[in-house]
């Protein structure tokens, strides 16, 4: 019995790792009542700050020709992609599935603002300019008021 349990645990760990890290951090889609919307918005701002920093450093590193600078350039490009994608996943997997609802009076406005975050994150992935990173921050600002911090 113990061997079977261990084998099952190994399979679960392997499958979880194969699915990617975004599945490890996604909140469940059941009504458990344990949510911190403000924390997710804050995390998106941190992701956007990483995108902004990446764009700045990419521009600086692009003029250098040494191998270490090229290595760092690739690492910042990858980080820009990862953090922009995390924002897309947070909006689509969390907010659009659990927080933006047709029953809300301002549904169309909320939907448009959340979609704007996804679009600007996509553009931040496609581009390497400061304007794209700034637009991403502004788009996140556009939904911040919906998710105020709750002091317990």
Image (cartoon, rainbow, N blue to C red):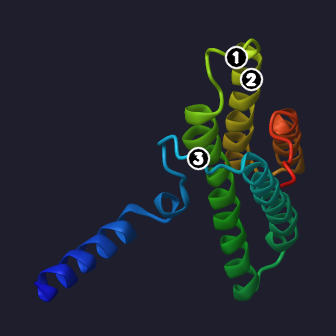
Q: Report, in whole angstroms, how far the alpha carbon at label 2 lies from the one at label 3.
A: 17 Å
The residue at 71%/40% (across/down) is: 123
Pick the residue in front: 50 or 67.
Answer: 50
Within-10-Å neighbours for mark 2: few <14, some 14–19, many 20+? many
The residue at 67%/46% (across/down) is: 126
Judge from the rendering whether residue 74 lies leftward or rightward of residue 134; answer left or right: left
Residue 29, given in percent of the width and then of the height, sits at 48, 43
Quarter of the figure with the C terminus: bottom right
The residue at 87%/53% (across/down) is: 151
Residue indicated by mark 2: 110
- Which-is-in-front pick, marks 2 and 1? 1
Q: Are marks 2 and 1 in contact (CB under 8 Å)?
A: yes
Q: Are marks 2 and 3 in contact (CB under 8 Å)?
A: no
Q: Report, in whole angstroms, how far the alpha carbon at label 2 lies from the one at label 1.
A: 9 Å
Label drawn at residue 66:
none
124 w.r.t. 99: above or below:
below
Q: Report, in whole angstroms, how far the alpha carbon at label 3 lies from the one at label 1.
A: 22 Å
Sequence-earlier tag: 2 or 1:
1
Q: How many marks?
A: 3
Q: Are marks 3 and 1 in contact (CB under 8 Å)?
A: no
Judge from the rendering whether residue 26 lies leftward or rightward of residue 19; answer left or right: right
Describe the element under mark 3 as helix, strand or loop: helix
Residue 23, given in percent of the width and then of the height, sits at 47, 58
Residue indicated by mark 3: 89
Describe the element under mark 2 as helix, strand or loop: helix
Residue indicated by mark 1: 104
């Amino acid at each position: 019995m113990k061997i079977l349990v261990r084998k099952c645990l190994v399979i679960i760990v392997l499958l979880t790792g194969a699915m990617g890290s975004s599945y490890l951090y996604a909140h469940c889609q059941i009504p458990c009542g344990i949510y911190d919307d403000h924390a997710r918005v804050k995390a998106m701002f941190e992701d956007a700050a990483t995108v902004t920093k990446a764009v700045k450093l990419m521009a600086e590193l692009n003029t250098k020709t040494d191998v270490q600078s090229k290595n760092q350039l690739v690492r910042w490009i990858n980080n820009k992609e990862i953090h922009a994608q995390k924002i897309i996943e947070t909006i689509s997997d969390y907010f659009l599935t659990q927080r933006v609802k047709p029953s809300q009076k301002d549904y169309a406005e909320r939907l448009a603002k959340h979609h704007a975050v996804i679009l600007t994150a996509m553009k931040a992935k496609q581009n390497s300019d400061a304007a794209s990173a700034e637009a991403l921050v502004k788009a996140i600002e556009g939904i911040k008021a919906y998710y105020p911090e709750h002091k317990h």
